[in-house]
Amino acid sequence: MDTDVLVVGAGPTGMTLANELRVAGVATVLVDKLPQRSELSRAGGVQSRTQEAFDQRGLLEPLLATGDHPVGSAHFAGIPLPLTRGRHRLPWRSIPQVVIEGLLEQHLAAHDIHVRRDHELVDLAQDENDVTATFANGARVRGRYLVAADGAHSTVRSLLRAEFPGQAGTVTAIAADVRLRCDDQAMTHSWNADGHWAHMFPLGTDPQGRPLRRLAMGGPGRSLPRDVPVTEDEIRNGLRNIFGSRVELLELRYARRITNAARQVAQYRHGRVFLTGDAAHVHLPLGAQGMNTGIQDALNLGWKLGAAVHGWAPDDLLDTYHGERHPVGAAVLRNVQAQSLLMDWEGTRDPSVAAARELFATMAQLRDVQYQLDDMLSGMGIRYPMPGTEDQPLVGLPSPDLRLGPVRLHELLRSGRGILLDPADRFAKVAALWSDRVDRTGQGTDGRPMLIRPDGYVCWAGGPDGPEPALGHWFGEPR
């Protein structure tokens, strides 16, 4: 056996997973077909929940220290949600994907995990004990498990012949990283009467400290085949059509055409092979939900693979990856498709769409509606189903970052182990049975008892039966 887990794809999802496996003490090989890391910004926003995940591993402060990453304002289909500002401890921020990848690769290298580049997967085979991957350069790697993090055009998914149902792309739009002269720096979402539109948000600064923006634009007559290069003249003409002289292109750094395809694999697990990130779900890049969902896929899967490798995973633990993350991916596809419709992404100028948007915009002024949308878009409202705990409101949700004496709960989660909060000092004997995989803490502090999984989700919160059933369900048989 060459390794415990082989991760194919070294984007944000693959590198996050490699780090989760490192924390779990699992031998990992991380490969990518590119000869070097991409310098393209790609995604550009980090949700509150993703920032919490980075904080739980000690990566948030180093990430925020990489540059000026402005706080963004929440919106749904371009409809602002001002009442949600300041609602979460860690607000949405503009952090380009290239910055996240750079930090993660540096962090992994510091722990002696180096991306094996120029590794293009051409074949894989699995049996009841392991998975063997073959690469175009002649290399072969055998591991107990393989995880596909190789993007929307996943080779692993193709080799598995995995069902990938959904909607094929019907139109394209432009996504570009640009420097602009813009009279109104707060300008974000704009449409004109002809159905042409543009959306902009900050991407930080270039090496010279000049502001960068992500620009998306489209509308009638602007849907060209994906392989047609995007030109500066095309962007200038589009900006002029929508903004007149208020916005001017100063520099085009990167551009591509994106489609409105929306697909999700039917199964996230195929024996010893797992699909994550864009290999499992693709959709329009609205709100950077693809990158964030992929990173959170990795957070969910990493500790479970660690448990399986170390031999204490309950029988169905690996299956809970599909059970928990597939519904999350499906919900993201639904909200993106709804936003696309309300934004009139295709530029149809359909009066029915305009009427629906007007009605929705009116409803979105209500606080409860804004909070509901914010929970969905921030990732903070994700609640994993945990049967038998319906009367425990915290169970299935991300744990609050409680102050426990001199440390925060997120700091304790950096061990990659479960946490049993025992403020009344009642569960010492029980916790001792699982002490090789769960830490007990919180004695003498205020608050209710809780059991928290290594990914930061509450799996018990003071139920009448005590923590034993939840400990056995999530952490296996006691030693």
Image: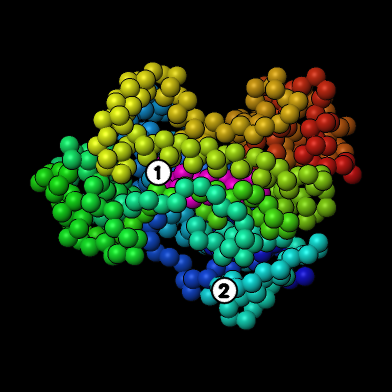
* In front of the other: 246 or 91: 246
Which of the labelled discs sits on residue 255, or is there none?
none
Image x and y of residue 6, in percent:
66, 64
* 309 versus 34 height, above or below: above
The residue at 27%/40% (across/down) is 348
Q: Quarter of the image holding residue 344?
A: top left
The residue at 64%/59% (across/down) is 147
Image x and y of residue 382, in percent:
57, 34
Give the overall secondary structure of the magenta segment.
helix
Q: Earlier in the sequence, mark 1 or mark 2?
A: 2
Image x and y of residue 362, in percent:
32, 20
* Res 424 seen here: yes
Which of the labelled discs sits on residue 119, or is there none?
2
Q: Which residue is mark 1?
A: 286
* 256 versus 292 height, above or below: below
* In front of the other: 209 or 311: 311
Q: Quarter of the image holding residue 8?
A: bottom right
Image x and y of residue 474, in percent:
77, 39
Q: Which residues are magenta?
A: 281-302
| Disc 1 packing (10 Å; few <14; some 14–19; many ≥20) | many
Please tell me whether residue 124 belongs to the stretch shown in magenta. Answer: no
Instruction: Tell how many labels.
Output: 2
Badge 2 marks a residue whose secondary structure is: loop
Question: In the rendered view, does 415 fall on the left or right side of 224?
Answer: right
The residue at 47%/54% (across/down) is 100
